[in-house]
Image: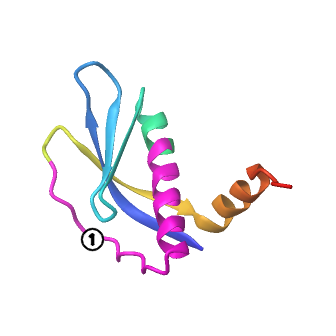
């Protein structure tokens, strides 16, 4: 299952970008825009998988989000099936 959510990228004074996905109410950041996008994708995947596991519905993505002039808004996609597969390969086996 793939999802796509609008994400706001805010340049930070110390460098890098803060990423905020308002529909999911999550923040993350990266040292540059590419890393911020990657971190946003990971955070979106994590929260969506967690919501699914808790039996909660995923919110519908907003068609527009309020943002400041210096911010970048972009759609960030996440493949939840691939994320789950990666998680299952990294899980510890308890004996």
User: Is 40 covered by the magenta stretch?
Assistant: yes
In the picture shown, does residue 88 fall above or below 58?
above
Residue for point 59% across, 66% down: 80
Residue lying furthest right:
95
Where the C terminus falls, by quadrant? bottom right
Q: Based on the displayed image, in which of its 4 quarters is residue 32 positioned?
A: top left
Q: Position of residue 1 (x, y in %)?
A: 60, 74
Asked whether 44 or 7 is in front, the reply is 44
Q: Is residue 74 left or right of residue 48?
A: left
The range drawn in magenta is 39-67
Most foreground residue, 36 or 54: 54
Residue 84 % position (x, y): 67, 63
Provide residue 55's location: percent of width, then percent of height.
Answer: 49, 81
Q: How is the image coloured?
A: rainbow
Give the residue drawn at x 51%, y 66%.
50
Using residue 22 as the reference point, say whether residue 4 is left or right of it: right
Q: Nearer the viewer, residue 59 or 5?
A: 59
1 vs 38, left or right, is right
Total number of numbered labels? Answer: 1
**Disc 1 designates what residue?**
63
Question: Image check: 91 left or right of 25?
Answer: right
Q: Is residue 3 above or below residue 8?
A: below
Instruction: Say whether residue 77 is magenta.
Output: no
Q: Residue at x 28, y 70 (%)?
A: 62
Q: Is residue 94 above or below residue 15?
A: below
Q: Residues within 10 Å of mark 1 (few under 14, many from 20)?
A: few
Where is residue 65, by image quadrant? Answer: bottom left
Q: Residue at x 13, y 42 (%)?
A: 69
For this orientation, the residue located farthest to the top is 14
Which element carries disc 1, helix, strand or loop?
Answer: loop
């Amino acid at each position: 299952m793939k999802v796509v959510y609008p994400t706001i990228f805010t340049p930070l004074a110390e460098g890098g970008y803060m990423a905020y996905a308002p529909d999911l109410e999550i923040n993350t950041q990266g040292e540059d825009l590419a890393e911020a996008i990657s971190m946003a994708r990971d955070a979106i995947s994590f929260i969506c998988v967690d919501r699914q596991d808790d039996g909660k519905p995923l919110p519908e993505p907003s068609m527009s989000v309020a943002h400041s002039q210096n911010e970048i808004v972009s759609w960030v996609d996440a493949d939840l099936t691939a994320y789950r597969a990666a998680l299952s390969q990294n899980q510890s086996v308890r004996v």
